[in-house]
Amino acid sequence: MLTLHLVRHGRTVFNTERRLQGWCDSPLTADGLVGVRSTASHLAATRLDAAYTSPSGRTRTTAAEILAHHPGTPLVAVDGLKEMSFGDLEASPEDELFREVDARELFGSVLAGTHPGFPEGEPAHEYIERVVAAFETIERAHLDDEHVLVVSHGVTLAVYLRLVVGGDLEPLANASVSTVSVDRAGSRSALNVGFDPSGQGVSAGFEPAEDTTVVETPKP
């Protein structure tokens, strides 16, 4: 039985400023780093045989903090784990988008694969295809009794979790942990979804954060 430990990256400057953050990046805030370290402590006693992250700095920083408790665990960056591209809207204030459509309605259409995509971005169905392909590749590589860390993004993790739970999801908190088991036949079960050991809650698009002190992103 494979066990996947899915972690959303820690809170970032753009999360706090409520800016759209897909393929663009911003560093973790000091408060975000505190939250990630709480999550790292929560996972410290869990065996991690392998780890995957998106190429974004915010996920690499988060993964590095968690793996500080797991020296020797290999970490691989996977393009398919990137967040959805917001195209020309990258780094724009969320209000520019959400004044036209409710945030939950918009992301619901993304997860359903019906959103056409943003200008110069990617259509939702193509986004979902690449995310699912990335997770299926990870699953195939670790069919034995292994524990695998995957650090990614709120919507990207929701794409995969929606396959598992088969329905709507609440937004995932920064630095939250969701756990999924996958048996040899490929059957998936959610052991928990959105556990928030740091208590930081949701920021981007749903509620504001305050701290904007930043921490440096480690070089790849």
Image (tube, grey):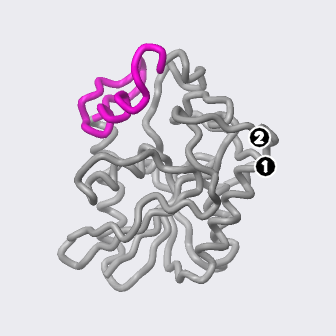
Q: Along the horizontal axis of the image, is 129 left or right of 3?
A: left
Circle 2 crowding by C-alpha within 10 Å: few under 14, some 14–19, many from 20:
some
User: Residue at point 21% right, 70% down?
Assistant: 187
User: Residue at point 52% right, 32% down?
Assistant: 205
- Give the CA separation, mark 2 to mark 1: 7 Å
Residue 210 located within the stretch drawn in magenta: no
Residue 104 percent location from the top left of the image:
39, 33
Q: Amino acid at mark 1?
A: Ala
Q: Along the horizontal axis of the image, is 81 left or right of 62?
A: left
Report the residue that reaches farthest toward the left.
Answer: 185
Give the magenta-colored segment's residue range: 98-124
Height in image: 99 above or below 62? Answer: above
Residue 148 percent location from the top left of the image:
46, 72
Height in image: 197 above or below 45? Answer: above
Q: Nearer the viewer, residue 220 or 37?
A: 37
Residue 21 percent location from the top left of the image:
56, 33
Circle 1 crowding by C-alpha within 10 Å: few under 14, some 14–19, many from 20:
some
Q: Amino acid at mark 2?
A: Asp
Under circle 2, the secondary element is loop
* Dots 2, 1 in contact, CB < 8 A: yes
- The label shown at residue 80 is none
Under circle 1, the secondary element is helix
Q: Along the horizontal axis of the image, is 167 left or right of 169?
A: left
User: Residue at point 30% right, 43% down?
Assistant: 128
Residue 13 percent location from the top left of the image:
70, 37
Residue at which label 1 appears: 30
Query: Looking at the figure, which quarter contains the C terminus?
Result: bottom right
Q: Nearer the viewer, residue 109 or 215?
A: 109
Q: Earlier in the sequence, mark 2 or mark 1?
A: 1
User: Residue at point 55% right, 19% down?
Assistant: 95
Residue at which label 2 appears: 211
